[in-house]
Amino acid sequence: MKIVLATGIYPPDIGGPATYVECLAREFSEKGNEVRVVTYGGIGLGLGSGGWKIFWVAKHGGPLVRWWRYSRALKQHAADADVVVAFSSVSVGVPLWLSGLKIPKRILRLGGDFLWERYTDRGGMKGLREWYNGVTGYWLLVTGLMGRLLRQFDHIVFSTRFQEELYEKQYRRLSPYSVIENPSPSPSSSPSSSPSPSPSPHLAHQPFRLLFMGRFVGFKNLFSLIHSIAGVHELRLREGAAGTDQPQLREGEMTLTMVGDGPLKEKLQVVSDQRQAPVAFLPPVSGADKQKIFAEHDLLVLPSLTEISPNVALEARATGLPVLLTSETGLSEALRQGMIIAKLRTPEEIRAAIMDVRMRYPEVAKSAGQTFPERSWQTVAEEYIALFKRLA
């Protein structure tokens, strides 16, 4: 079978789609399929770690120029494919529509929401469900256009039932659709029938070490996270740091490490410096370096307005690292096992939830260390292959 994976980002870029496409390409290739990846980035041809071809499309120029260039690449490299899987409704979906491809079946995989993310990039603070419940004006127009774009696909794959239900309500006459959940807990998962080995419970450090890992973008609600940590720090300084030339972190305090990159990085650093918050910024990590980061921290905090299917939460959970996750999440009840789910919209809510975890950390760490059934990349790939065969 000839499979083309069309994505906006691919390693070394960071983000869910980049990791997802690389791991899926490896599984498809190992099953004997001819795999090609088309992505924005450099120019020319590359090879994936498993030998599949990667066709890079230059991303300079405005959206129309990029879309036209990408559509030409699809026309050249996907015309004889059996299936094209697009991993973005707009940056890839529009070029796929412009390409006019007739032979391959066209599938859209949705793990995020393009329009809502643009709304949060402009400073909007509504979660995904709340936003769709009150779409008006300009956004009502663009959701209408999005509906027409979605109908260009032969099939839509959602990563969660949560997003599927929202789209069922918002978009009329959707193309056929189904749910294929993300793998759990990590790219190295064994088959879904075998459980994860039980990790040893984490022991809290002093000061308490918080971690965020992901993209620095609007819907992640990272300014609220920094303000929450700054508030704790300022409280501790007021309580007893008088008389020291250089106030030091004391018992009961906490630090925050933010691992990742994105358009808000500089602004986040400025706010952190202004508030004198104990925050360290680190570049993206992967593989053994990511596992080391998990081991060195006490709590992963994801205070997003909405987290549809946060893979980093599953990866952290697999190592036994406790996870504090926003209450608006698409993760199924089974995948949320061992995580702390809380409302994390404001700095006050985030601070209260963190302090609650800190007070009962041994209990929380024990829960995070419990085993749960794994869902491997192999299983995910098999579900896609079964879908491809149904559409053939």
Image (spheres, rainbow, N blue to C red):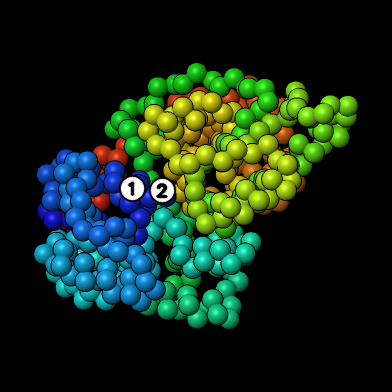
* CB contact under 8 Å: marks 2 and 1: yes
Label 1, on which residue?
A: 11
371 lies left or right of 107: right
| Rendering coords of residue 128 (x, y %) | 55, 61
| Rendering coords of residue 124 (x, y %) | 62, 65
117 lies left or right of 124: left
Badge 2 local density, few (<14 within 10 Å), some, or many (20+)?
some
Residue that protrudes farthest toward the front in the picture: 245
Residue at 25% across, 51% down: 384
Q: Is residue 141 above or below residue 125?
A: below
* Quarter occupied by the C terminus: bottom left
69 lies left or right of 203: left
Label 2, on which residue?
A: 14
Q: Amino acid at mark 1?
A: Pro
| Rendering coords of residue 364 (x, y %) | 61, 27
**Would you say residue 162 is visible in this rendering?**
yes
Q: Amino acid at mark 2?
A: Ile
Q: Label 1: state its secondary structure.
A: loop
| Rendering coords of residue 228 (x, y %) | 71, 44
